[in-house]
Amino acid sequence: MTKAMVYNHTVLPIGTDDPAAEYRALTQAAAIWDVGCERQVQITGADAHRLTTYLCARDLRDLPVGVARYAPMCDHDGRLVNDPMALRIDETTFWLSIADSDVLLWARAVAGEGGYDVEVTEPDVWPLAIQGPRATDVVAAALGEWVRDIRFFRFVRHDHCPQGGSETDSIPLVVCRSGWSGQDGLELFLMDGTKGEQLWDLLWQAGEPFGLGVGAPNNSERIESFLLSFGGDTDPETDPDEAGIGRFVSLDDVDGSRTGHDFIGKAALQARRASGSQRRLVGLVIEGDPPSPLRSPRSIQSPEGHPVGTLRALARSSRFKANIGLALLDPPWFEPGTELQVSVDSTNRTATTTPLPFNID
């Protein structure tokens, strides 16, 4: 890897000098990603279930052991503070597999103020992802055919002892069918940081027959599939509805009655949703040549030149053969088919809004 950034106070490899090869591996074979920056906040103790459900806007009261759920978290004003995957490791232990923000401090503060009987820590857990249409083949070759039976957002604890190895060679893992791509894939949560090279070498050798390539979370593919990048696609004021993930928030029952799930920010989110004046994250199709990488959000203007929102993400899509982006827009400018203006590579370009996920002819 030749490019990196700091994410969750950890170095995240973000690319090589051949992004086209990375994209091909992810979409046609399999890609291996070091995502150790995807830190885990562990909540354990008698009140672990009660605290976790209060922290998360998605109802986790019926979350079984061995199951994960995407579970956005809000502050008391309904603003997103993170969008983790919550895993129930055992009856009294939960992991929040977090995006880039200090959830450890947030959870400790809420636990302390609320008098919860829990311990909140960052455990020795280091995720590694295998993503792509041959991802399961790679992991099955490395760990065993049993991984093919893991369902989406389900996980299995597994101590893998390499053939001919001793108990001290065992690699402790949580193997979960999940990952930050629209492809098939698994995430392997390594529970002993000293075994990182051993695990990487095991997977790399197993993956060679399947075309395994090195890579990193892929911006182009995740925009195509619309996977939210917290802190990139969002700003500090964004709520889940604005970010396009409101369906993962447990505000109302199907019949419109209030759920019994109480969580931080619930009343504020109900008021925001009732106001009907929120922004919305939508897709953009942008004319012109393939763009340079977006270094920071760009202002988007109406045809008359008035600011109406910001361009949050941008990429050239190999799948759609078009320039695509994600934009956080004021009402009513997010309506599908609206033409707007945005400056890309010092050129003022026409951009047309489209619903997410992308479905471009």
Image (spheres, rainbow, N blue to C red):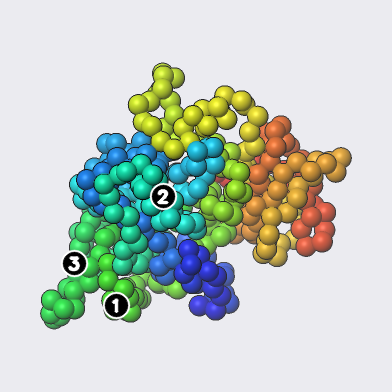
Q: Residue furthest right?
A: 304
The residue under label 1 is 194
Residue 103 horizontal/vertical position (percent) = 44, 54
Residue 14 horizontal/vertical position (percent) = 53, 69
Q: Alpha-carbon distance for marks 1 and 3? A: 14 Å
The residue under label 2 is 109
Residue 58 horizontal/vertical position (percent) = 40, 38
Mark number displayed over residue 99: none
Q: Is residue 238 left or right of residue 171?
A: right
Q: Is residue 318 left or right of residue 118?
A: right
Q: Is mark 2 in CB contact (under 8 Å) with mark 1? A: no
Q: Is residue 314 left or right of residue 92?
A: right
Q: Alpha-carbon distance for marks 2 and 1? A: 31 Å
Which label lies toward us, 2 or 1? 2
Task: Say what secondary structure mark 2 lies in.
Answer: helix
The residue under label 3 is 159
Q: Alpha-carbon distance for marks 2 and 3? A: 34 Å
Q: Which residue type carries mark 3?
A: Asp
Q: Residue at x 18, y 74 (%)?
A: 170
Q: Is residue 8 left or right of residue 140?
A: right
Q: Which tag, 2 or 3, sits closer to the chain's start?
A: 2
Q: Which residue type carries mark 1?
A: Thr
